Each structure stands twice: as C-alpha cells, then as structure tokens.
Image (tube, grey):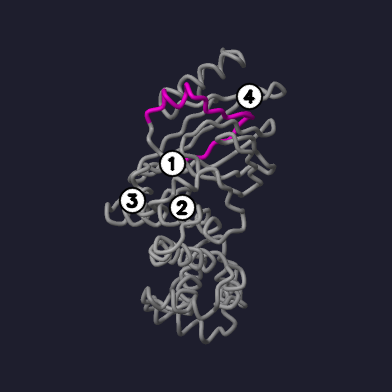
Amino acid sequence: MRNNIFSSADLPAHLGNEARFSLWRDIYTADIASVEFGISDKDPFYAKFEASHIGGLVYAKMTGTINRVTRSRQSILADTHDCYSLVINTSPTAIGGNYRQNDIELKPGEAFLDAGEPQTILGQDHNSWIHLGIAKKLLDVPFARINDKQGLVARHDAEALRLLRNYLMLFDTGDLPASPTLTDHVAATIIDLVGLVTGAKGDEAELAGLTGLRAARLEAVLSHIRTDFSNPELSAEFIGRKLQLSARYIQDLLAATGSGFSERVLEQRLLRAKTMLNDPRHASKRISEIAYEVGFSDISYFNRCFRRRFGDTPGAAR
C-alpha cells in the first residue's frame, strides 16, 4: 500500500488565485487523470487530494472549492487510465448534472459508477467526494454486465454501499496489512462490494455475497464492538438493530472466526481496563471505577477475568 497527498496548500505561496488553480489543475491532469474542473468565484481556491493504493485499486478523497467536474471527448481521449470509478458524494449537499446525456443527482452519501464517459457534475462552492478507482478488468471478469450499470445511482442507505463506506475506513486508519495475501483479500472484498453496490444479480451477486458482503458485515460488527464495548447494554441484538441484521446471523458470523460475541467484547473491555490501570491519568480512580467504566457490572467477575487473561490481579497491574 502507498499513499499520495496532493494539496494546493503545498503550491508556492506567491502565486495568485488563478495561477494556483492553473498549476494545481495541470499537475492533477499529468499525474492523476484528464479531467476539467471549475472553481468557485466566491472563495479562494483550495483543493486537497488524498489517495491510497492497494493492489489494482485507488481509494481517493477530494475536497475543496471545486464546483464542476467535466469529462469532454477531448479529455477522455487524453486519459490513459482504463478504470471504473465509483464516485461517492461526501458533501453535505447534493451534486449532479448529466452523464452520457442522462440527468444524474447524487444526494449526500449516494454513489454512481463512472466508466469515464462524457459528463458534467456540478456542486456548491465547496464539495467533497470519494473516488474509488478500479481497473476495468478487475470488475469485468466477475461482473460481466457491470458496464451496463454505469450512471445508475445507489441510494445512501443501500446496505452494500453502507458496508462499503464502512470498509473503506480501513484506508483512513493507515493500518492496512503489508502481507500480499491479506492485501489481495482486502482488494477482493472491495471489488465484490462494488459489484453489489451497482446492482449485480444472479450468480454474480451470490458469489459476491459469500465473499465481500460477508466480510464487510463482519468488519461492521467488529467496528461496533470496538466502539461500544463499554456499553453494559451491548449485545448481538443491540448491534443487529443498528446494522439491520439478526442477532443469530451476527453470532454465526463471529463464531466462524473462532471467537464469539461475548469473547470479543470481554477482550476489548479487559484490554481497555489494563490500559487505564497503567495510565497515570487514571491513578486516582479505584479499580472498581475502572471496571464499571469499561463495561463490567460485577467487580468479582472482572477480577477473575483479568487474572485469567493477564496472569495477575488488577491491583498488581498498576
């Protein structure tokens, strides 16, 4: 995996607004893609592009005062990237325009598949979006009819899109695996989810459901456990209501990994308790306070679990 950050803030400070935009646009066109931009005439020009590369995928985030993106016939001919792009609107307002002479509107959180066709997408004076670039051959093989899906809008609350957005957050943490095998697995999961987002049907959807969708659901469940482990009310039913999954499905999903729901929650609570016990900022707290804060309701049970996990008592760990 490698990262690339390209910001107008890094351009020479002495340049005027138009000169900064012109230089930024030229660098973007040369290094990233042949696209024509328009900018707000109300605010100083600013744009930031962050990209993570994994396998044949590019996960990029764009934000700034760009209010128009156009792909003309000329810019398409000049572009050497043979890729699909899944574009996700992360702005607080809708963006839209036309794609292949068809009207298109993306509300916040919605997405559409772009195969590099003629288009003009307009927004407000400040916009942000995600660009997920995938080499066409990586999608054409498992999803033979995916080219027919370009320009179709996926609703923000569609499960596959919601899970994809959640899964892409792995790129934001910087903790992606260096192992080629694990890297390939992450890339394959994303490809499967993109196929589902665009409306893959029949055998294609079944294949993706056994791989990408299941992996993304697992990551969503684990993310909720990592975030909400200290909540005494946390349960498979609690997470299921948030993810619109049954508690039984969540239990089965985790059981297949070798660690059940209760085991994973307990591990998170114990790790957090150990961290707090070793942290001088929590030195004034009683052990029982720390136990309750991380989600335990029984101090005796906490003591037994802590000793079994770390081989010592909570008091000795301070």
Q: Nearer the viewer, residue 188 or 70?
A: 70
Q: How many angstroms separate mark 4 from mark 3 (CA)? A: 38 Å
Compare marks 2 and 3 and give the one earlier in the sequence. Answer: 3
Which three-letter amino acid code belongs to the residue tagged 2?
Answer: Val
From the top left corner, tell me how far across and down residue 82 is, in percent: 37, 35
* Secondary structure type for disc 2: helix
Mark pair 4, 2: CA separation:
30 Å
Give the magenta part as a residue range: 60-80
Which residue occupies the extreme left position in the image? 180
For disc 2, the marked residue is 194
Mark 4 Cα shell of 10 Å, populated few (<14), some (14-19), many (≥20): many
Q: Circle 3 sits on which residue?
A: 141
User: Does the magenta run of residues contain 66?
Assistant: yes
Task: Report the mark closest to the observer, 3 or 1.
Answer: 3
* Dot in front, 2 or 3: 3
Q: CA distance from mark 1 to mark 4?
A: 25 Å
